[in-house]
Amino acid sequence: MAAVVLDKVTKVYPNGFQAVTDLDLEINDGEFLVLVGPSGCGKSTALRMIAGLEEISGGELRIGERVVNDVSPKDRDIAMVFQNYALYPHMSVYDNISFALKLAKTPKDEIDRRVREASAILELDDQLDRKPGQLSGGQRQRVAMGRAIVRQPSAFLMDEPLSNLDAKLRVQMRAEIAKLQRDLGVTTFYVTHDQVEAMTMGDRVAVIKDGHLQQVDTPQNLYDFPDNVFVAAFIGSPSMNLYEGTLADGSITIGSNTLALDTEVFETRPDLRGFVGRQLIVGVRPEDTEDAAVKPEHPSDQCIHTTVKLVESLGSEVMVHFDIDATSVDSGDPDAAQDDGTHNGSAVGRFSPRSRARAGDNIVVAVDTARFHFFDPDTRLAIRG
């Protein structure tokens, strides 16, 4: 195993398009690091530069103690798992898994030992004589993993390996891959556009946008302490509700709604005092709202009167879409539907299943203002200090 270090790595294409800019990222020895971002943000380009499939325009890439900028892909001691599995359809599962070892002229008994070990780990013992076309999507994914495992590389690179699977199988496979990585302890760099995958699999998660690294942290810290508006909205499902607001000493006004703020809001964020009387960006997570009818003890000065637009019942929780008389803020995510800022916004709340709210109802929404997120409207950075 080995650490993988990207030191101000940049990728500029011949037409002048800069896909990745000064990327500083360290994947520690044995760590599972996930790079996540919207379509076209440069995440796959970053992975392909590590693999040697894209030339590095600037900066330095190290695998272990070795600078590998100019080292060929086959000599980088990495194994890659592709989105489309890249299996040979005419070969058996055994031959697919062992192919790279045969090319390396590994002794036959060593090949057999490694293939048998990998197949046992991946529960493929009964499939070794079958062809890829006879396997399910999940089994083909395991074969691709087996091919990487037998090489015993310094690092695994995985490029959206679950995107071709159906939703139920994706959930199963992401748990299997995460467990496998923990068991093997191999340094792993995993690329995805799915933030749920990122949050459930990674030891740490790196968020990238337009080729620029936004934040790197543990999944929980990314969720609780986003550095900027983009990360705040990108991490979390449903996305954080974002509005223009005006801060007062002890309250926040969002559109026509004025909500009381607990003193601890200012105690934990002393820099917020500098925004009193000024406009800022307010972020409200859906789970920090509730139907006031099932939370009667909630302070009335921390409630919003609104009309329900849509209710999505998920059994264990209810997603309630409602109007809010406030101007929404564009998160900067190109994959998300954005409010144009010229009309009243909408909000999504994650309510208890005890809520009886229905489309068209006038309801009161209890809001946990102690859990609000605040951002500077000019820099779009979090106000936390």
Image (cartoon, helix red, strand yellow):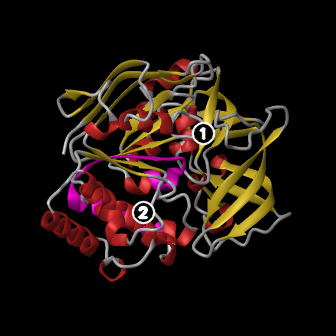
Q: Is residue 259 magenta?
A: no
Disc assigned to residue 174: 2
Where's residue 273, x and y in %? 51, 22
Q: Quadrant of the C terminus?
A: top left
- Residue 237: image x %, image y %? 58, 54
Q: Residue at x 46, y 71 (%)?
A: 132
- Is 383 in front, or is 43? 43
Visible in this render: residue 178?
no
The amino acid on which the numbered mark 2 sits, given as a three-letter code, is Arg
Name the main secondary structure of what is drawn in magenta: helix
Q: Front-most of 245 and 317?
A: 317
Mark closest to the chain's N terminus, 2 or 1: 2
Residue 77 percent location from the top left of the image: 25, 42
Counting labels gives 2
Q: Residue at left 43%, top 26%?
A: 55
Q: For the residue marked with disc 1, what is the amino acid?
A: Gly
Residue 129, picture quadrant: bottom left
